[in-house]
Structure formats: C-alpha cells, structure tokens
Amino acid sequence: MKRILWILLAASVLLTTGCKSKVKRNVLPNVSGKAGEVLVVIERADWEADLGVAIRETLAGDTPYLAQREPLFALSNVPPGSFTSLFKVHRNLLLMNINPQNASFGVVYKNNVWAQPQALVQVNAADAAQALELYREAAVMIAEFYEQSERDRIIANAKLYEERALQDPVEKVTGGILHFPSGYRCRKYTDDFVWIADEKQYTNQTVLVYKYPVDGPDVFSLENIIRHRNAVMQANVPGMFEGSYMTTSTAQEPTTRSLRYHGRDFMETRGFWEVHGDFMGGPFVSHSFYSPDGKDIIVLEAFVFAPRYDKRQYLRQVESLLYSFEWKKDAK
C-alpha cells in the first residue's frame, strides 16, 4: 500500500512540475503603463542632446486637429543601467542600443518581448550620431508602430466586451462589420446611415457609418469628400436647437492622406466639426473607400465631443474602432 501511495505522490509532483514549467515558458505578464505612454531607454547625456530632442519632437509633438495642444505620446525615460524588470513590462518601449560592438546596426520592431501586448522599437547604433540618423529616417514609421499598437489593444478590448448586436446595422449598410465595446448604443439607422455612440454626461464618442453613390472621377478629392459629408450631416445629425446641424468647420482646412490597412485601401480625412447654429465642435477622422461592387463610397467616421477634457485619448479610442472594420465574408 505504501508503495502505491509513493508512486501516486511522485506522479502528482511530476504533473505539477510539468504544468508550472509550461506556464513559465508560454505566459507573459500583462503590460504596465498608461495608454499613450512610451518609455525611452537612453543615456541621460543623449536624452538631453540632439537625439533626445529629435525623439521629443516626433513622439511628443502636437497631436493634429485638436483644439488644444496635446502630445502624441507621453514620454518618460530611464538610463540603460536602470532598465530593470520593473520597466521591461512597459506597454511601449524605445531602446536606444548605442554600442560600437553591436553585431548589426538599424531599427528593429518587436512585439511581446517581456510582456503582452507590448510594442518595442530598438535602435542599434555605434554612436549617438548614427542613432540620431537612424531615428530620423524611421521616425514616422516608429510613431505609427506605437499608434497602431495602441489601436490594436483597443480593438482587442472591444472584441472582448463587444456589443455584438451593433454589427447588424453596419453590415446592412456596408456589407462589413465594426466591433464596438460595451457602452455603445445605436441612435439612428436608415438604409444608408448608421449613428452609434457612447454618450456620457460630459463626453461623447461617436461613429457614423454612411454611403453615397459614386458620382464622378474625383471621388476621393478633399472637396468631394467634404461636400458629401456636409450633406449627410445636415440630413442626419441635428443640433440641439431648431435648424441647427453638424457641418465641417472652415476655421482650419481638413487634410487627407491615402492609407492601406489589412489589404484595404482608403482615404483618411481629418478635420474639425461644428454645429451650424450652435457653439459646439470637436475633432473628427473618417475613412472613405469603395464598396465591393464599386458603385458606392462607404465612409466610417469617428468624432469626439468632450469640452471639459483633453481629447487625445478619447479620439484615439473611437478612431481605433474604424480599424476594426472587416468585410463580413472575411469575418466568417
């Protein structure tokens, strides 16, 4: 009997040990830090010199199309000698690896090195001058890498706590779906327009989905996009007072740029919205692209109204939802 008990005990220890080792190999801790933060690992002398200036100019520069100045990312820094396990789990890391004995030189992009979901950029250089050159060449891509990593985290959270019923009206208008987290509700739905919003006492994060027929060769010109936008807003988004409605602000001209994401080409438009007949306004961003049959232009638009608060993170959150769009056939 004792022999049987010893065998069972030994088997139990082996199974427990095996499970523990498997967990250690495969599971990374969750990231630390607030949304929109980047931790820069750099020597103090380099942080205060040209290299640090270049990093702050790009990653901590003004976020475009906000009423007040807000940095693109909040930066903090730590010297390499103090870069311990406490800092290695940060959500966004920029490592300035300056050493003449590096095996290779360049910019490397990595995910989930010490934590998840983590975004890490490592600049391998022989000296500070080379690091500055490498960083400047890749600055736009580095910023977009962190931006998309922030979006991916928001999308993952939206899918985890999704209001799945909101897929239906978007699919009926566009043939695709968006993923909305809990808190969003459908305010209006027609054959060619959907209004979905998360409305709280002092903040409003809204996604508008609409379409209109292709009516000329310059469908993605700024003039054409804004002309259709203003017509759709006037017809569908009224203000608080009689005769008031949303429109595009002319105080600062919107801008467009062509983007490609997950195999889908679209025109991004950024600008300010305002309410004709009222004193309301804020930033908006939209994605315009062809329907699968090429007969319509589909527009996904995100806007924010948060007069009491900074708007960078509110806009980043709702804009990220636009990147969750996928054609229904692809989702299946």
Image (cartoon, rainbow, N blue to C red):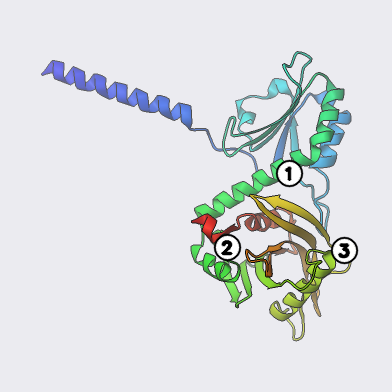
Amino acid type at image mark 3: Glu
Q: Nearer the viewer, mark 2 or mark 1?
A: 2
Report the front residue among 291 and 247. 291
In the image, taking residue 178 as reference, residue 306 lies left or right, namely right
Residue 188 sits above or below residue 87 on the image: below
Choose the circle earlier in sequence order: 2 or 1. Answer: 1
The tag on residue 253 is: 3
**Quadrant of the rendered image containing residue 17:** top left
- Whether the residues at callouts 2 and 1 have beta carbons within 8 Å, the answer is no
Q: How packed is label 1: few (under 14 Cα within 10 Å), some, or many (20 or more)?
A: few
**Quadrant of the rendered image containing residue 126:** top right
Choose the circle earlier in sequence order: 3 or 1. Answer: 1
Measured in 3D between alpha carbons, the distance from the residue under mark 3 to the one under mark 2, in whole angstroms, is 30 Å
Residue 185 sits above or below residue 36 on the image: below
Residue under the image location 56 percent in, 63 percent down: 183
The residue that label 1 is drawn on is 144
Residue 35, percent from left and from top:
66, 46
Q: Nearer the viewer, mark 3 or mark 2?
A: 2
Report the front residue among 38 and 221. 221
Measured in 3D between alpha carbons, the distance from the residue under mark 3 to the one under mark 1, in whole angstroms, is 23 Å
Amino acid type at image mark 1: Glu
From where the camera sits, is residue 36 visible?
Answer: no
From where the camera sits, is residue 262 visible?
Answer: yes
Q: How packed is label 3: few (under 14 Cα within 10 Å), some, or many (20 or more)?
A: few
The residue that label 2 is drawn on is 176
- Whether the residues at callouts 3 and 2 have beta carbons within 8 Å, the answer is no
**Quadrant of the rendered image containing residue 144:** top right
Q: Secondary structure at mark 2?
A: strand
Q: Secondary structure at mark 3?
A: loop
Amino acid type at image mark 2: Gly
